[in-house]
Image: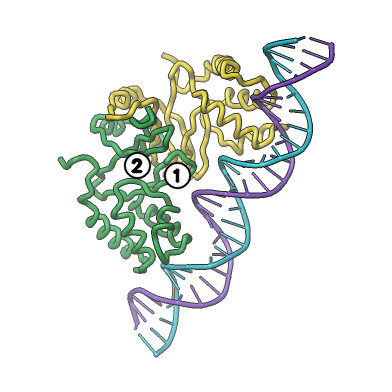
Chain colours: A green, B yellow, C purple, D cyan
Amino acid sequence: MSTAIDSHSTKDWTGFAEQQISEAGLRHSSPRQKVIDLLAGQDCAVTALEMDARLEGVGRATVYRAIEQLEGLGLLQKVDLGASAYGYEKVDPSGHHHHHIVCDSCGLVRPFEDESMETAIHEVRQSGFRIKGHEVTLHGTCQDCA
Amino acid sequence: MSTAIDSHSTKDWTGFAEQQISEAGLRHSSPRQKVIDLLAGQDCAVTALEMDARLEGVGRATVYRAIEQLEGLGLLQKVDLGASAYGYEKVDPSGHHHHHIVCDSCGLVRPFEDESMETAIHEVRQSGFRIKGHEVTLHGTCQDCA
DNA sequence: TATCATAATGAGAATCGTTATCAGTTAAGT
DNA sequence: ACTTAACTGATAACGATTCTCATTATGATA
């Protein structure tokens, strides 16, 4: 098993994303590619406005459109950062993923993984619902704020 | 054990909330009381704007202020409803709580409980963090949308 | 009961994140 | 090269939340 929160899949994801985009009948474009590249190099959630700020020559509308499309293709996941803004992070095609702990006083977000919690969540059944995914957020106080 | 998602604690919570408010050096006021009463009668998350709409004679700013105070006192919990707006629900002093399944196509939110998932989450340890709470959201498709 | 310090209020302005509009641009199949 | 439709950035519109401020009301104290 790889060490926690690995990024070995950066290139895999980029290629996979490009392929999915093209299979969906979407075209190739440089602005959207920049969004993809930025997300590929990120291990945890990034805000839409952060992306917009970091990407020269990419309009804000385009950033939001790209997010929408990637999310629709299941390539991106929206995560609640608690501060009335969402973060987005790539979805590994292998299914490998992490969750988040956020410090309630400074807002620090740290990714974490836990095998047995994961198992327990997969065993949850809810009548009438086909469960496709899950999101866990732990809240607390980080070392610096304690 | 009580049946799932009970509301037996409505009155407990109201009383507890009033007590905590007063102990925090806050005064009693009728607008804030209306917010408390509305929340007390609710089993699952309500939006700030929903509260504002339902409460006659309570300004929007007051609704947000009350939410902020109650949340600060640990009487209220913010939950991510996925649609770029948060919902708020009372925190039972007994520690009893539920989580949410949301239908990704119609937005339906349904509360659920799962004992063994709960146990697994409580066993999660993260160095440098004092974990105080957690939030789980299951995603999927509801019966009507399937 | 009158006084007083200050918490609490509502209306509205300001801000922030997100979505919609639209006219011009560009990718890619023919 | 031509054509079609996806793509684009700028900007307006929108919904949710926070801030400002002048006024009101609570509740402890005299």
User: Which image quadrant is residue B13 in?
Assistant: top right
Tell me the amino acid under the disc marked 1: Cys
User: Which residue appears at 29% of the width and 40% of the height?
Assistant: A98
Residue found at the very far left of the displayed protein: A1
Identify the residue shown where x is 29% and y is 55%. A40
Query: Is disc 2 in contact with disc 1, using a CB cutoff of under 8 Å?
Result: no
For label 1, the SS is loop
Residue D27, image x, y percentages: 69, 15
Q: In the rendered image, which residue does mark 1 sit on?
A: B145
Q: Which residue shows up at 51% across the image and 29% down it?
A: B44
Residue under the image location 60 percent in, 34 percent down:
B64
Q: Residue B131's spot in the image, x, y percent?
A: 35, 26
Element under label 2? strand
Q: Position of residue B20 (x, y in %)?
A: 55, 17
Residue A127: in sight, yes or no? Answer: no
Q: Is residue A66 above or below residue B130?
A: below
Residue A39: name its quadrant. bottom left
- Horizontal side of residue B103 vs A98, given as left or right: right
Tag of residue B137: none
Which quadrant is the N terminus of chain A positioned in?
top left
